Image: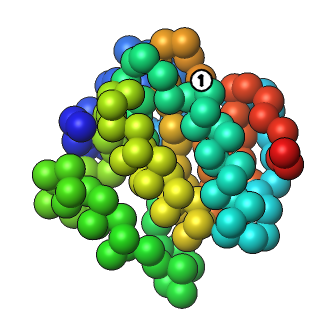
């Protein structure tokens, strides 16, 4: 795993031809497929897992958390910290909000994304090649470059 600051994550996105918005974050308005997030944390997790099936592959995948703890009752921070600590990252999420992970770190990618979607954090999951991208928002909607069925 390579931990990235927001500035480093922005540079990585620019190199991957991911558009950046005026706030310096991936511009999810460019994603073609929009969807509402399920109310159930388990269903959100299942939906994210289906997206990850497309995103995680032979190349590095970036997980960029851009908003968290919007809903304090859904914090999840301790679980997320445990996943990061297991990978050797001890700095705070505010300082290091993005992570480049290889395919051998797929379980960690899935753990990070699962925590984020269960606790309604904003998270971008971007695979550079082939370019796939999914975004999940604390406002209970999402977008992706590839259509994924909401239910299986």
Camera sees residue 54: yes
Q: Vertically, is 91 above or below 29?
A: below
The answer to which image quadrant residue 40 occupies is bottom right
Q: Residue furthest bottom?
A: 73
Choose between 38 and 28: the one closer to the eye. 38
Residue at coordinates 56% horizontally, 17% vertically from top-left? 131
Choose between 18 and 151: the one closer to the eye. 151
Q: Quadrant of the C terminus?
A: top right
| Color theme of the render | rainbow
Local crowd size for mark 1, using a 10 Å CA cut-off: few (<14), some (14–19), many (≥20): some
Give SS at disc 1: strand
Camera sees residue 91: no
Q: Vertically, is 21 above or below 47?
A: above
Q: Quadrant of the N terminus?
A: top left
Tag 1 residue: 132
The image position of residue 73, as x and y in percent, is 54, 87
Residue at coordinates 51% horizontally, 38% vertically from top-left? 125
Q: Vertically, is 76 above or below 132?
A: below
Residue at coordinates 38% horizontally, 28% vertically from top-left? 103
The image position of residue 76, as x and y in percent, is 44, 74
Residue at coordinates 36% horizontally, 71% vertically from top-left? 79
The image position of residue 18, as x and y in percent, is 51, 22
């Amino acid at each position: 795993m390579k931990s990235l600051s927001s500035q480093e994550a922005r540079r990585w996105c620019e190199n991957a031809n991911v558009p950046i918005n005026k706030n310096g974050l991936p511009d999810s308005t460019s994603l073609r497929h929009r969807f509402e997030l399920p109310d159930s944390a388990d269903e959100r997790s299942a939906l994210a897992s289906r997206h990850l099936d497309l995103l995680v592959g032979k190349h590095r995948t970036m997980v960029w958390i851009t908003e968290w703890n919007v809903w304090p009752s859904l914090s999840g921070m301790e679980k997320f910290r445990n996943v990061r600590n297991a990978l050797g990252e001890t700095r705070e999420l505010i300082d290091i909000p993005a992570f480049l992970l290889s395919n051998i770190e797929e379980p960690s990618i899935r753990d990070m994304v699962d925590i984020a979607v269960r606790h309604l954090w904003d998270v971008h999951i971007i695979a550079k090649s082939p370019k796939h991208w999914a975004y999940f928002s604390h406002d209970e909607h999402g977008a992706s470059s590839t259509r994924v069925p909401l239910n299986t």
